[in-house]
Image (tube, coloured by chain):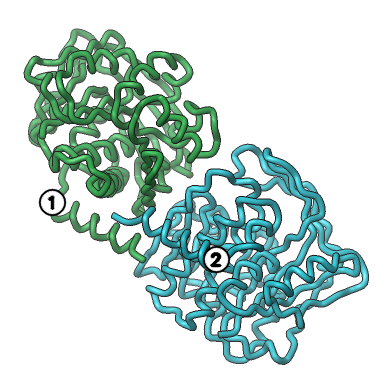
Chain colours: A cyan, B green
Amino acid sequence: MSLLVVGSVALDSVKTPFGEATEVLGGSATYFSIAASYFTEVRLVAVIGDDFPQQHIDLLKERGVHLGGLQKREGETFRWRGEYSHSLNEAKTLETRLNVFETFHPDLPPVYQDSDFVFLANIDPELQCNVLTQIKHPKCVCCDTMNFWISGKRKALQATLEQVDMVIINDGEARMVASDTNLVKAAQKILKWGPKRVIIKRGEYGVMMTDGATTFAAPAYPVENVFDPTGAGDSFAGGFMGYLAKTGQTDDATLRRAVIYGSVMASFNVEAFSVNGLRHLTQDAIHARYRQFQALMRF
Amino acid sequence: MSLLVVGSVALDSVKTPFGEATEVLGGSATYFSIAASYFTEVRLVAVIGDDFPQQHIDLLKERGVHLGGLQKREGETFRWRGEYSHSLNEAKTLETRLNVFETFHPDLPPVYQDSDFVFLANIDPELQCNVLTQIKHPKCVCCDTMNFWISGKRKALQATLEQVDMVIINDGEARMVASDTNLVKAAQKILKWGPKRVIIKRGEYGVMMTDGATTFAAPAYPVENVFDPTGAGDSFAGGFMGYLAKTGQTDDATLRRAVIYGSVMASFNVEAFSVNGLRHLTQDAIHARYRQFQALMRF
């Protein structure tokens, strides 16, 4: 089934203890699309400036990503500069230049309005709500968010949460949005606001998914060489939503497998800078790591 | 099969955001013994002062713990006072009074020297080594340790690690002892020093066990009301070693089930102060939570 993502396409400059990369392809919609492209065709809605390198557009095209909703505006592309300390747990943002992203309005091409599966990446919750007014009969809508919107636009964020089926969120942000340090209670509070399911990303510790009655928890794949965690959450979301869209199902068993496919894509992503860990994968490599997850969790 | 633990019996004073408990039963060998007592008979070696309340001894006896190695000395029992912040992740030690524990020497009663399964709780690694000289033909020896010994007695600790089959260690301490922030690499480094398996406790994030070739990872049980994390690691070790001793096996499948039983006991323990979460359990309650783990991890 069709899968739509609305988010950012960016040029990232990242420094980790293992190296650095300057002005490389990044952005939530980018990581999501490339990860999801191994499961289904992806419709991308985002904005770039007139300085955006053609090679990056070619890369997205090679992965079969539909770019009919990729707006090109006069000015510079969104840029993010960040640094990771040795623990690699959290990025320290050194600079954010929104540029053309500042006035981004997610106008959907008419053919995208019938999308079945929708992922609202981490953008202004007012824009997330606006996207939903343009979608006709979505089968499953999932959103992400971040601390910036939780503290700055809580009302708009709650309006988004009322309308989505699922929310994918970091553990720190789940605790923040629910004002509760206990993750089980935080998830229950978020569920009361609307979504049927909460998927909490815990970085190197894995993922917890709950609908209030049933909970699934998976560890992260034990990656020996983490080079750059940037985009891990969006790669997870891409694998997760990509698998759901591929199967067209949203029952509990399918959702659990989707969490593992999301974790597989995130594990590949952190093994290299930018999207280099994702761009040259094979179906065999993806399924081999899925089976490694089975071996990892079997008891 | 027989199970021996050498560690501490203490009187703890603990403050958490949810209440406080003063001079309550604590200590690594205590938590371990009570958790393990649901699986097998436990032989305890530790020291108490002449101020140690009889009711605590009665509690250990009720749980069938063998106290032939519990030395009573003139003076005060080991006391620990600590506090947890709202995140509950790490205890802040406010006071440690070793008292009779300062001159503790783990002399094993002769009947304990044929113990099959041995857990060396977090004590001076020189004492851990000394215990091993007293054991005749152990089937499986497992040790714990902490940052204090890692920085203060590294050589003695390495001598212990050379002789044990398995080490159970916190993630922070695994990173510290191996001087590597990546947990996979840290585990590999520890394996090179001798133990056949490393079991890394990640608190609310669960457990990872590896022998270098095969890895098992389990999330923690999502506990809604964590009252007091004190003793969670030792309760885990008690359930883990207790199950191994009960089955008499140490193959990979048994070890995986043992990790889950350990996680079950840790999850009960954190639901109340002191050993109150452990002392009144039933086999039904333990197996019910084991099945909840199956539901939690199944995909």
Q: Pointers 1 and 2 in contact (CB under 8 A)? A: no
Q: Nearer the viewer, residue B59 or A95?
A: A95
Residue ID at (84%, 72%): A103
Marks 1 and 2 sit apart, C-alpha to C-alpha, by 37 Å
The amino acid pointed to by label 2 is Ile
Using the image, name the chain to which the residue with label 2 belongs.
Answer: A
Q: Badge 1 local density, few (<14 within 10 Å), some, or many (20+)?
A: few
Disc assigned to residue B283:
1
Q: Is residue B45 visible?
A: yes
Q: Quadrant of residue B190?
A: top left
Q: Is residue A38 above or below residue A290?
A: below
Image location (x, y in percent) of residue A120: 64, 73
Q: Quadrant of residue A280?
A: bottom right
Inspect the image, locate mark 1, and give the three-letter code of the amino acid beneath it: Gln
Which residue corresponds to mark 2?
A: A168
**Residue A15 located left or right of residue B174:** right
Q: Position of residue A99 (x, y in %)?
A: 86, 64
Q: Secondary structure at mark 2?
A: strand
Quadrant of the snapshot with the N terminus of chain B = top left
Is residue A17 shown left or right of residue B171?
right
Position above or below: A152 against A229: below
For the residues tagged 1 and 2, is the chain the same?
no
Q: Secondary structure at mark 1?
A: helix
Is residue B20 something one can see in this rendering?
A: no
Label 2 crowd bin: few (<14), some (14–19), many (20+), radius 10 Å: many
Q: Disc 1 sits on a residue from what chain?
A: B
Q: Residue at x 89, y 64 (%)?
A: A76
Q: Nearer the viewer, residue A261 or B107?
A: A261
Residue located at (52% from left, 58% from top): A201
Taking the spot 35% from the left edge, 45% from the top edge, the residue there is B227
Q: Which mark is residue B188?
A: none
> Residue A78 or B275: which is nearer the viewer?
A78
